Structures are given as C-alpha cells and as structure tokens.
Amino acid sequence: MTAMAKYFHVARVSMRARTAYLADFLLGSVFYALILYVFVQLWSVIGGTSGFVVEGFGPRELVWYLMASEAIMLGRARFEHETDEEVKTGAIAYSLNKPYHYVMFKLASYWGETALKMALYILIGSAVALAAVGPIRVSATHLAGVLACTVLALTLNFLIGMALSLSAFWVEDTAPFFWIYSKVLFVLGGLFAPMEVYPDALARVARATPFNYVLYAPARLFVQFDADFLLRTVAMQVMWAAVLALLVMALYGMGVKRLNVNGG
Amino acid sequence: MAAIDVCGLTKVFEVREKAPGLAGSLRSVISPTVREIEAVRTISFSVDEGEMLAFIGPNGAGKSTTIKMLTGILHPTGGRASVLGITPWENRQRLASEIGCVFGQRSQLWYHLPPRDTFELLANVYEIPKSVYRDRLEMLAGRFELADFMSTPVRKLSLGQRMRCEIAASLLHGPKVLFLDEPTIGLDVVAKRAIRGLIRQMNREEGVTVFLTSHDVGDMEELCRRVMIINHGELILDTSVSALRRDYLRFKIVRVRLADAIDGFEMDGVAVIKHKQANLKLSVDTDLTSIDEVLAGLMRRARIVDITIADPPTEQVIADIYGRDASEALAGR
C-alpha cells in the first residue's frame, strides 16, 4: 500500500460523509441553479438591448462562464471553519500522533467533498445554461486542459484557505479573513464576469494576484479555449501553488511549534 | 522490560496575560506579560510491558499533559521519556503505529458515518493489509459486541456504544501500548463496567500495556494493580491499588433513603455526614464496620427504599494523602 493510498481513502470517506445528508446536499444545488437563472435573465436583457459583445464574450458566453465560475465558487468544500476550530480548540494536536500529515489529510478530505459537489453543480449548471442560451463549442481535448486548470485552481483555493485557517494560531478570530477572501474572489477572482469585460486598470491588478487563477482562468478556458492561455495559466498556477504551499507548511510548522510550547 | 520509561519529565506552559481594558490590550501587544505554568514537575516512573497502570488525579493535575507528552503530541520542557524504546516527540509517526490512544473527550470517529467507515479509514491510514484488517475487525467486533450498530451513523449511537467503538478503533492496528485518557467519562454505571471489562480482556489476551488516566477511582480499582497519583504536576504517590485501598479507600460514602424517618444512626466506624428525616449520607470506615453490617443496622430501623455506595472522590483521596504526609511529618519531628 503506497503512502498516497491512505489519502485517497480519506477523500473517499469525506465524499461518503458529504452524502450522509442527501437532501441537504441536493438542496445546496438549488441556490446555485437560482443564481444561474438570475444571471441568465440579466445577460439576456443586456445582450438583447445593446448587442453586448466584448472580446468574444456575448450573453451566451457570459452565462456559460458564470456556470463554470460559480460551480468552482460554490463547489469548493468549506473546510476553513472546521480547521479554524481545530486550531483554536487545540484539537489539531490530536492529529499529530497519527500516521498522516495534517495538511495532506485536510487536502484529501477537501478533494473528496469538492469533487462530488463540483460534479453535481456542473451537471445542473450545464442543464440550466443549455436550456437558457444553447450550447457552446467544446472538445474533449479542451475539456482535459480545463480539468487540469480547475484541479490547480481548487488546490490554490485550498492553500489560500488553509493559510488563513492556520493564522488562528496567532489571531483570535479568522472569520473576517474568510469574509474578505470571498469578496476578493467576487472582484479580483472574476466570479460574475471575465477580466475581458473589466476596466483595464482593475483587470491588470486582478491578473497580478493568485485569485484570478482560482475562478477566472478555468472558467475563461472553458468558454474560450486557447492553448497559449492554458500553458501560461498552468505555469502561473503551479508557481502560486508552490509559493502558497511553502507558506502553509511554514505556518503549520510554526503553529505546531507554538502548540508544543503552549499546549493544546 | 519497561514499555514506558520516564525520567524527570517536565512541562512548563507559557501563558500570555492581559490587563483589563483597552490600555491593557495595547500594553499586551507592545510588551506582553508571560506567565509560566508548571503543568508537570520532574516526574519519573516506568511501566512494565503488559502492566495496567492507573494515573489518577483531579482536573488540572497534569494527567493529560503527561499523556500528551508520552504520545508525542507535546514536547516536554525538560527530562526524557521513551515509549517502546522510542522518544515520542522525536518520532511521532513511528510511534503512532505502535500505540493506540483514546481521548475520552475527543472522538476519532466520523460523526455522520457508521463506525465501519472509520475502521476502514483507519485500516488505510495505518496501512493494515486487507486480510489482517478483516480478521482483526471481526475479532474486535465480536469482543466489543459492535455488530448491531456497525452500520449505524455514529451520531445515533449512545455514549457507551461510541466509546466501545473508540477503543476498538484504537486497537485495530494491534498496538502494544494503549493510552486511555478518561475512557469512562460521562458513562453510566453499566457502560463503565462494560468498558472496564473490555480493557481488562484486551490486556489479558493480547498483553497490551495500558496507561490509564482518570479521575474516577473506580476505573483504577477495577482495572489496575498499580496506581500513581498526580496533583499540581507532581507525582505524590506510586503504590499498589491494594495498598491505596487499604490506606486511603477504606472509607465508603453510603447514601440511603429509608421508608420512614429515623431519629439518628450510630454505629462503630460510621459517621453521619448528612441526615434529613429519612435521607442519610454516611461515611463508613470499612476496616471497623462492613457495609453489610451498616445495611443490616439500617434495615433494623426502617425499610431501605434506595441506596448508593460510592468511593470518596479523588480530591478527597488526595487530601487524605496530604493529610497523612503532614501528620507523618509532624510525628517525625
């Protein structure tokens, strides 16, 4: 049995735990479908009255873009509150003497839940978008690229969330950080619209941050596939993931050291 | 051979203190005041392989801190310790597959899933081969009588059932040493008895060394031959359970409700702690008078409606130990 097999199993169990309350799980997707419906109406009105098209993004592309970005935004597992509690209450200490790495355990658990939610949201989102604005052109090769980019995007989201959660070792309340992060994702992440429709200055700022690689990059690739953009994006995602992974490990190391000094 | 060897183990926690008010908050940021708390003070002991040792003490005595150091969760401030020849805080992961831990107030079971899922996960985490896991689970499920609720979500289990699952989970990978931190906390009498029976059985049949912390004197009396008592971080007693029983636990607290009110109750070795009409709380020195005799004496006066017999609380035992030390010291002067 390889060392990675245990983390794969953690993901499976996390997936199972997520479906324990099937009704709640399915109900969450209603909210997602509702957001999509509202934006379908909005873009249809804008597109219908002014023939809105910016750099290839018309109402149809914008609806599909939103389908993809919202699927990531709402489909990502919300592990932050639990991690924050584990740090604050000292429960994290009890994972130290288990034969796994805490951060890897959390990542595996995150992926188990995220994969399931994402699959459901993409299914629902595609059905809504298809019914509202019709299909867009995608190929299997493109989808493989989008999938790779989405996996990296969600990993980036995990690393940012984990870094913020681990700050609970030093600050009393991390909730404001998560509130700010979600709002930053709205704007700099490009949740509702791609960078192409942003004012230049804002788009430049957004592109310099890792947040646009969480939502904008995979959603944009899904709607407008471009091999060059894919390569550039993946390279930047890997770079940001490496930087954030180092930060998370440093915070974790310092936090555990602090735990050793101050107790659980 | 010693399974656990501890020498001069010390743990000092640093606690930041803050003066009240906004000014105090600002001061604590600029020049924080740090207070040191000595949770464990240079304790030394060893536990033989296959031994069941009770580590008793009131809340905040240092029991959990000690167990956390021995399981590698905390680094000590001083001293050394070895568990199965491994220094816990230096080789946490290596030690993890050799020991099992149950923390009575922390669950390792997945709350929304049946215990079977957690067992399966732990088998993967501890890298137990599939065939070994199947046999082991079958054996533990049989012994701990888990079959009836193996597929019931943990959230629907009683506390006693959950604790049986917790202990079974900690034994899944066949640990040589089992650390139990308050395993019977919050359980009723029947569940406590069941848990104690299972721990005893695993020790007898698999030779598992058991290091048990509790503030329930009953855990110690029913499970262990040796007991260590810790208070304010110091080891104040390391003796056999029979010696402790003889010296400090000979007093029992008897609460009784009679059918009719009585005027008073007198008997050798019996002190009336509280008396209100038909309700009595007695302290019985079992060296002078047996519980049987006390009950017989009470029944001669009135019919017994309800009765409970309890050990004195740990705090009382510790107070007695200190009292005895003080009087012995005075006598030695």
Image (cartoon, coloured by chain):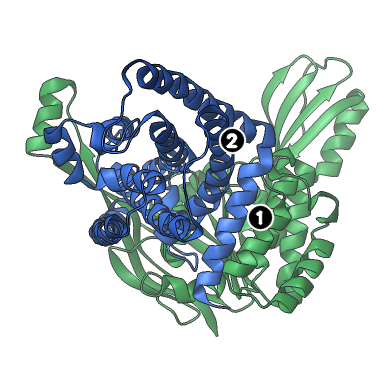
Look at chain A in the picture and name its colour. blue
| Residue of label 1 | B166
Look at the picture and state if B176 lies above or below A11: below
Q: Amino acid at mark 2?
A: Ala
Look at the picture and state if B241 lies above or below A61: below
Instruction: State the residue at coordinates (81%, 68%).
Output: B138
Q: Amino acid at mark 1?
A: Glu
Q: Position of residue A256 (x, y in %)?
A: 32, 57
Q: Nearer the viewer, residue B208 or B79?
A: B208
Instruction: State the residue at coordinates (27%, 43%).
Output: A211
Look at the picture and state if A84 lies above or below B248: above
Instruction: State the residue at coordinates (28%, 67%).
Output: B78
Q: Position of residue B286 (x, y in %)?
A: 73, 47
Look at chain B in the picture and name its colour. green
Q: Do callouts 1 and 2 point to residues on the same chain?
A: no
Q: Is residue B235 visible?
A: no
Q: In the structure shown, which secondary structural element does the residue marked by tag 1 occupy?
A: helix
Task: Indicate the quadrant containing the N terminus of chain A: top left, top right, bottom left or bottom right.
Answer: bottom right
| Residue of label 2 | A127
Residue B300 lies in quadrant: top right
Q: Position of residue B173 (x, y in %)?
A: 64, 72
Q: Is residue B83 left or right of residue B89?
A: right
Q: Is residue B280 left or right of residue A208?
A: right
